[in-house]
């Protein structure tokens, strides 16, 4: 008897339903859309006075930790905490504004949010604070995202003003 070259049909596993983000959810796996503007800033290097104050006060604090007789491990942990606390100022940040939302990267921190996640903004000399609407626990704890202007402050302000309403005075 000749063997048949026909293969048995393989039963397909049922596909698991893909969990879609909720309609009003501000957290999305990836903010899609047309890129409107992208830039990179390093505030520590660009704002010399603030950078100098931060570096000197950090060295002073670490000196106090060392003077108190703590071991090298505690000094290193203190330095890591300082960098973590002031990460958005100390480490370079990359921003991408799209027609759908904002992408932000600072060190190991990567954040993507739709414009609908923000309820208002406040303009400052060196950037714009985007405030979350505050519906979820995370949004209540975190105020929002501070966006440094970089070299194109007018363009950044224009794009953000098109997508978010300004903060009303208290």
Image: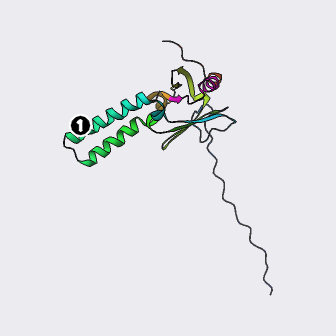
Q: Is residue 111 magenta?
A: no
The picture places residue 73, in percent across and down from the top left corner, at 27, 48
Left or right for 157, reference 77 = right
**Mark count:** 1
Depth order, front residue of 35/154: 154
Above or below, 59 against 4 in this view is above
Residue in the image at 48% along x and 44% along y: 108
Task: Determine the residue located farthest toward the top in the rendered image.
Answer: 170
Which residue is disc 1 drawn over?
A: 64
Residue in the image at 59% along x and 38% along y: 28
Above or below, 158 against 88 in this view is above
Which residues fall within the magenta stretch? 145-160
The picture places residue 160, in percent across and down from the top left corner, at 61, 25
Depth order, front residue of 131/45: 45
Q: Which corner quadrant of the image does residue 7 belong to?
A: bottom right
The picture places residue 156, in percent across and down from the top left corner, at 61, 27
Circle 1 residues within 10 Å: few <14, some 14–19, many ≥20: few
The picture places residue 132, in percent across and down from the top left corner, at 52, 27
Task: Determine the residue located farthest toward the bottom in the rendered image.
Answer: 1
Q: Is residue 153 magenta?
A: yes
Secondary structure of the residue carrying numbered label 1 = helix
Left or right for 45, reference 81 = right
Depth order, front residue of 115/108: 108
């Amino acid at each position: 008897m000749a063997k048949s070259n026909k293969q048995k049909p393989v039963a397909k596993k049922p596909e698991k339903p893909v969990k879609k983000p909720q309609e009003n959810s501000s957290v999305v796996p990836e903010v899609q859309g047309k890129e409107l503007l992208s830039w990179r800033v390093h505030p520590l290097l660009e704002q010399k006075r603030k950078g100098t104050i931060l570096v000197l006060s950090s060295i002073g604090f670490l000196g106090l930790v060392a003077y108190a007789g703590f071991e090298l491990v505690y000094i290193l942990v203190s330095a890591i905490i300082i960098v973590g606390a002031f990460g958005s100022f100390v480490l370079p940040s990359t921003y991408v504004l799209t027609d759908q939302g904002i992408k932000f990267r600072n060190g190991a921190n990567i954040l993507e949010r739709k414009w609908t996640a923000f309820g208002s903004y406040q303009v400052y000399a060196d950037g714009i604070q985007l405030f979350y609407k505050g519906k979820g626990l995370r949004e209540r704890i975190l105020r929002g995202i501070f966006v440094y202007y970089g070299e194109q402050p007018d363009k950044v302000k224009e794009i953000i003003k098109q997508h978010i309403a300004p903060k009303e005075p208290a």
